[in-house]
Image: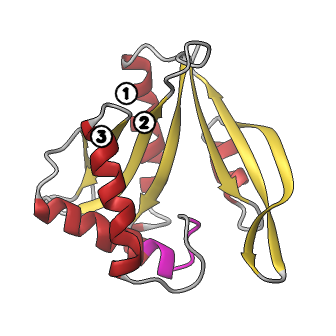
């Protein structure tokens, strides 16, 4: 299945519902998207609403991957730096692909679209963090990102389970 990528889709109630459900599905399939263990729609919805507010304020932009029926199946958010010394790069947040589509190249395609848009914004780099212990750094490295920092045990996912917080950088020039 091919996805069509759209920057700044209209944030309709239907799309926000799909985003919330995608986030729950990705998390509950084991994705490292800000929650630990099984989560619910009610747990995730405040994060979606936070993105809506931040998009309205111009601090984030949404990249949506839509299936042929127009359903949200992948997403990533650009987070723009307000500090004058960091405006040359943006953060990439909440990178997600529907678990039913994972392994089909959609994650790589999503990152490629993010890179294309970042270049169009005039950015010089993209930066993201990922949770250690899941092999995500290998996935991002295969897409051209370089590991530039690691905080050992920087994330606590359970009382006795700490993971590295890994920073990745993609130069665009």
Q: Earlier in the sequence, mark 3 or mark 2?
A: 3
Is residue 20 in view from this perspective?
yes
Q: Is there a contact, CB below 8 Å, between mark 1 and mark 2?
A: yes
Residue 39, percent from left and from top: 46, 83
Query: What residue sits right under mark 1 in the picture?
Result: 117
Residue drawn where x is 34% and y is 50% of the image? 51
CA–CA distance between discs 3 and 2?
A: 16 Å
Where is 2 relative to 116, above or below? below
Give the class, few, some or many, for how many residues have Cα within 10 Å of label 2's Cα (few <14, many ≥20).
many
Whether tag 1 and tag 3 are in contact, CB under 8 A, the answer is no
**Residue in the picture at 39% in, 36% down:** 113
Q: Which residue is mark 3?
A: 55
Residue, disc 2:
114
Residue 60 drawn above or below residue 87: below
Q: Nearer the viewer, residue 106 or 21?
A: 21
How many numbered marks have been drawn onto this rendered protein structure? 3
Q: Which stretch did the figure color magenta?
A: 26-32
Q: Position of residue 106 (x, y in %)?
A: 42, 55
Camera-side residue: 22 or 100? 22
For marks 3 and 2, give the one nearer the viewer.
3
Residue at image location 53% in from the left, 64% down from the top: 33
Residue 108 lies, with reference to residue 22, above or below; the image says above
């Amino acid at each position: 299945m091919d996805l069509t990528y759209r920057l700044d889709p209209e944030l309709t109630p239907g799309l926000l519902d799909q985003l919330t459900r995608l986030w729950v599905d990705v998390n509950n399939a084991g994705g490292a998207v800000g929650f630990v263990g099984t989560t619910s729609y009610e747990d995730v919805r405040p994060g979606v609403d936070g993105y809506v507010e931040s998009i309205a304020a111009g601090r984030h932009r949404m990249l949506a991957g839509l299936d042929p029926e127009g359903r949200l199946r992948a997403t990533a958010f650009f987070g723009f730096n307000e500090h004058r010394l960091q405006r040359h790069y943006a953060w990439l947040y909440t990178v997600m692909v529907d678990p039913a589509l994972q392994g089909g190249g959609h994650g790589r395609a999503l990152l490629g679209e993010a890179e294309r848009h970042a270049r169009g914004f005039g950015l010089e780099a993209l930066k993201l963090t990922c949770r250690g212990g899941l092999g995500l750094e290998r996935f991002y490295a295969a897409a051209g990102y370089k590991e530039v920092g690691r905080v050992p045990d920087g994330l606590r996912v359970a009382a006795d389970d700490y993971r590295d917080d890994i920073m990745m950088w993609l130069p665009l020039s």
